[in-house]
Amino acid sequence: MDPKRELTSVDLAALVTELNRYEGAKVDKAYLYGDDMLRFRMRDFDRGRMELFLEVGDVKRAHLVDPERVPDAPGRPPNFAMMLRNRLSGADFVGVEQFEFDRILIFEFARGDENTKIVVELFGQGNVAVLDEAGEVVQSLETVRLKSRTVAPGAQYEFPSSRLNPLTVSYEALARNMDDSDTDVVRTLATQLNLGGLYAEEICTRAGVEKTTSIEEAGDDEYRALHGAIEELRTRLRSGDFDPRVYTDDDGDVVDATPFPLEEHDRRGLDSEACETFNDALDEYFFRVRFDDGDDVEDAGSSRPDFEEEIEKKKRIIDQQEGAIEGFEQRAETERRRAELLYANYDLVDEVLSTVRETREASVPWDEIRETLEAGAERGIPAAEAVVDVDGAEGTVTIELDGTRVEVVVDTGVEKNADRLYTEAKRIEEKKEGALTAIENTRNELEAVKTRRDEWEAEDEGDGDDGPDGDEEFEDRDWLSMESIPIRSSEEWYERFRWFHTSDGFLVIGGRNADQNEEIVTKYLNKHDLFFHTQAHGGPVTIVKATGPSEPSEAVEFPDSTKEEAAQFAVSYSSIWKQGRYAGEAYMVTPDQVSKTPESGEYIEKGSFVIRGDRTYFRDVAAEVAIGIQCEGETRVIGGPPSAIEDRVATSITVRPGRYAQNDAAKMLYREFRGRFEDQKFLRKIATPDKIQEFLPPGGSELVEE
């Protein structure tokens, strides 16, 4: 029996019961080990020091650890750990709950009037998200952008789709789910009732029902026995009536830890050791367990730190922080606009508030108020027409003003409602200031890692075996079949933008967001460069560089192939891709035609520009990019127009607009590349799904069959 690497939903239900006994404990400090394990040092007034560990990598666990077994604290705390310390130092542990019967724990902490929730996802890829009191993600270990849900800084946290909870299922619901199945009893319990394999077998054993019984042969007697066994499991989990065990095999190796003895483990002949609490059992289990990871284990003799992985992690954090800052700006501006709309429509808003307030003082129910307003809207009364929603539970009315919906509190006047919105805008801007400080700290950390890497490489200089020919030693190699590919990389100024080199060797850069569009034009667009954009709204500012930013500006004759590739780049990374269109239109102008000065009476949004004069158009440009693995010279992932990428890489895959979310498409590409390279370790270091995702256009994608 293989040792378990992840806690089950039953394990988490038991943990919640035990951990809530520590309500009121104080948080001292938070630590982050690597990029997937958190430690919270806390103090319980009755029990003393307690150490809570949350791990969401290949091993997924959450439990208290004996202070004697706590590893040494890591070096300089990364930004994520500093953010946790700022929010949680001195905070009280309010409690923890399990999201439905899923493998998700929600820890809540309170300090003053500020509450923080930490959502720990112990399924799939694993993740930890820190939420503010409004349920917005402050920061997360990983950013998730799927069609079904998003977990990203500045966005509302979204839980996965709900699943049936076997601990609360009624007998009727259990019978319906069983009858709808076309397999046997144990598989139905495991999948349809979400009990998982081990506990599905345990329920069958305790109910006295043969697990291989087909659903066609099962009936009311079997269903009631199974439902009764589930009821007993629920009662035991909620009451805390545990008898925790650590199970070992014939060799004495631990293979499982459970909150109470399992008959299924006894039938397998496993030995068990009793523990005082389930947390103790899990601590003992994970302290003693040894996982056999085969080829996934890095060579123990390699002492060189993985600087590139750390650098990529910092860069991903910076991208998340930049996105959060942009979100704060947009939200603050939205709140200010709502406040201004209240004043601009003062009389109408005041009439709505006064009417509803007077009606409420006459004890008229909210439902009747809603019906009265709807009737008034049908008669064409402007104040009634403006009302789009009434919320009696919150005592608010939502009014539509110039196409924008504004929620106002009935018991206060126009001025106080506007002040509330201005205050909210100010609060959001303060969060933006905090994010700006955080991003500066992360950039400093990134520079520190680069410095350490350069110092390490300087010490090794001269010790290599490349010889005088350098890269020539590796020319004409069959990179895909090589067992060990040397990693050689450097950091370039343009890598935080979208970028590629044309087939003629010219650098092309594009913005990832409005801020970068603004920066590229104001800081990097020189008079001999070329400017590209799409006719469709929402695309990257794209420029072809004649020379580097530190080089003298010189006139260059750009080949047609470079212009065509830049146009394809502009089209592929624009909203055209998001809309699922396979082609679009781009235009080219010179830098002197690009201006930030609008016509009189007009306004230009951030990242937008005025183009004056004639444009050169590129019609019916294919929305298509290639992602490839470069092995000669620099070793890295690159992406861009296929004609610019395919000759530079050992292997490539072409993608076009499709149905797979960006994150999923990146994982599909990674799996495809993994099947092509013999050197898996090389690929894991330079071409993780996160690195691949940086070169995918925003929106859905699909791989093009070759």
Image (tube, grey):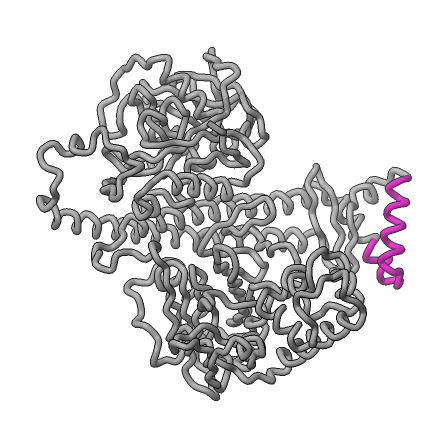
Relative image position of residue 79 (x, y in whole percent): 37, 58
Q: Nearer the viewer, residue 314 or 255?
A: 255
In this picture, residue 239 sits left or right of residue 112? right
Residue stretch in magenta: 356-378
In this picture, residue 397 sits left or right of residue 115? right
Compared with residue 591, is residue 75 higher up or lower down, i.e. above or below? below
Relative image position of residue 136 (x, y in whole percent): 55, 56
Q: Is residue 611 visible?
A: yes
| Residue drawn at 46 percent across, 84 percent down | 273
Residue at far bottom of view: 46
Compared with residue 462, is residue 178 higher up or lower down, i.e. above or below? below
In this picture, residue 672 sits left or right of residue 178? left
Relative image position of residue 72 (x, y in whole percent): 30, 72
| Residue drawn at 46 percent across, 12 percent down | 616
| Residue drawn at 9 percent across, 37 percent down | 467
Question: Is residue 373 a member of the stretch shown in magenta?
Answer: yes
Q: Nearer the viewer, residue 411 or 318?
A: 318
Q: Main secondary structure of the magenta part?
A: helix
> Which of the 4 quarters of the picture holds residue 677?
top left
Compared with residue 206, is residue 568 higher up or lower down, i.e. above or below? above
Q: Nearer the viewer, residue 273 or 158?
A: 273
Q: How many marks?
A: 0
In this picture, residue 286 sits left or right of residue 336? left
Question: Is residue 2 a member of the stretch shown in magenta?
Answer: no
Relative image position of residue 664 (x, y in whole percent): 51, 43
Q: Is residue 26 visible?
A: no
